[in-house]
Amino acid sequence: MSNGVETGQITTDIPARLDRLHWSRWHWLVVIGLGTVWILDGLEVTIVGSMSDALKDAKTGLGMSSFDVGLAGAVYVAGACLGALFFGQLTDRFGRKKLFLVTLGVYTVATVMTAFSMSPLWYFAARFFTGAGIGGEYAAINSAIDELIPARYRGRIDVAINGSFWVGAAGGALLTIPLLDPNTVDQAWGWRLAFGLGAILAVGILIVRRNVPESPRWLFIHGRDEEGDRIVKDIETRVARENNEELADVHETITIRQRKTIPLPLIAKTVFTMYPRRTILCFSLFVGQAFLYNAFFFTYGDTLTSFLGVTQTGYYIAVFAVSNFVGALALGPLFDRIGRVKMLTATYVVSGLLLGYTGLTLDSYSAATLTLMGCIIFFVASAGASAAYLTASEVFPMETRALCIAFFYAIGTAAGGIAGPLLFGKLIDSAVSGGQGISAIAIGYYIGAVLMVAGGIVAAFLGVKAENRSLEDIAEPLTAQSSSQGSHRAQPASDHASNAH
């Protein structure tokens, strides 16, 4: 790495060195240590969705109604939104590693408290803080992963990692089967054990995560370039040894004005003034996927039991979850090969149209066929939803990355993720009390369909061709200076300077 040309200014080749690395076991450490948090999120959401009947029972549960179950989902999402904003700002200020350790700790403690809930109010409070930990994780982890993974792998890895939510969802669904079987576990303890097991998994992840380094990109901007250089040298040594190769030299550099902190007003100006097209893009993507997933999935177990006579929902939800993860794995590589814009458009529009068709024909489904249709819809939608997080994490400047992820996650999820579960819970309660069939909740499907199709159309016009490009090329750091040392920084400063494509 080049020495700084003046106090507070350096010229570095760290981004180019990280991007030129081939995949190795070290990168798998990053994926396992950081990416597995989505498994926890999937576990949490599925346990709540699968245990709606257990939570409703006044003797063994907490005496909650369908609306209460939906409200618990909304409270969890509200906590995630606020947690993302709170921890997102801290992630950009104090570093990725400190915060991805803190947020996992918050999640673990809150999950244990959920297991000990003695009343609906206690349960709601515990769910709020569990969500806060998960929301903080989204901001800290997405930014760290994108800054450590080479550019040519970033799309597929991000989509697959975000899609691993469904590994947790499938595991949570299957876990509830024995735990909700009165012949196996006392029903007063089954749902509590499910939450406790989530905390045990979190502790295991925390042990692995301690070995993941701080982002060198964050370090060199915040005046710790020598530490960042040492980390990159260590990574290069490990990758070269593991792959039995000699790494090629790099010539691309970037010149940075180092800062300890980036003022919040500057971050806000960046998001709203410099990148208005990207702001609209991310908002549209997050609102669509948040409503679709939170509305459908938080209440799917309740839908099956209320309208289709299912008493054990775990198997249905597990099959549904597996299709989502397979979709993310199968379609993820296409975001690098075909491109972000085309794939975002296709996944959002196709899944939205399929969801709308399902709403129109809702009366014709059994539990099995509705689940099968859900598998088809979300096989496509899961890749697009995962790519929404990828988009927010790569199209804004380095200094604002974690907070931008948090911001769009929060506003998009608040608009779609809080309203969705509340709406579906209310629709289910009203339909059951009024003696109506499942078609009474079709309006929720239509809203989700419209939001997804709209997100796809926005992506077609405002999407960013970020595939195989360095993060610094996609969005130049706010602290960047023009470099006279062969810098490859030709990316325009804002949406106003060029077409966002």
Image (tube, helix red, strand yellow):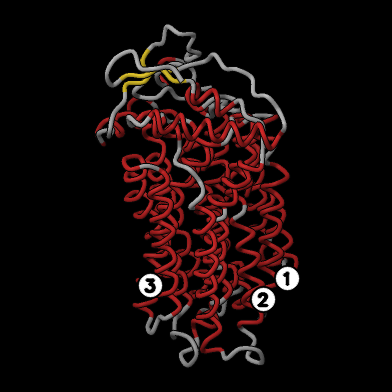
Q: Do the residues labelled 3 and 2 touch (CB within 8 Å)?
A: no
Residue 316's place in the image compared with 1, above or below, is below
Real-space Cα separation, disc 3 to disc 2, in angstroms? 28 Å
Residue 425 pos. (x, y %) = 48, 69
Residue 365 pos. (x, y %) = 72, 67
| Numbered circle sitting on residue 366 | 1
Residue 394's place in the image compared with 300, above or below, is above
Residue at left 42%, top 81%? 116
Residue 173 pos. (x, y %) = 63, 70
Residue at left 55%, top 33%? 459
Helix, strand or loop under label 2: loop
Real-space Cα separation, disc 1 to disc 2, in angstroms? 7 Å
The residue tagged 2 is 308
Tell me the quarter of the image containing the C terminus: top right
In the picture, residue 164 is in which quadrant? bottom right
Q: Nearer the viewer, residue 402 or 103?
A: 103
Q: Callout 1, which amino acid?
A: Ser
Residue 249 pos. (x, y %) = 60, 17
Q: Nearer the viewer, residue 45 or 203?
A: 203
Sequence-first disc among 1 and 2: 2
Residue 418's place in the image compared with 27, above or below, is below
Q: Callout 2, which amino acid?
A: Leu
The residue tagged 3 is 124
Which label lies toward us, 3 or 1? Answer: 3
Query: Of all residues shown, which one is farthest toward the top?
Result: 484
Q: In this view, does 199 lie to the left or right of 105?
A: right
Sequence-first disc among 3 and 1: 3
Residue at left 39%, top 39%? 404
Q: Are marks 1 and 2 in contact (CB under 8 Å)?
A: yes
Category of crowding for the residue at label 1, using alpha-carbon neighbours closer than 10 angstroms: few (below 14), some (14–19), many (at least 20): some
Sequence-first disc among 3 and 2: 3
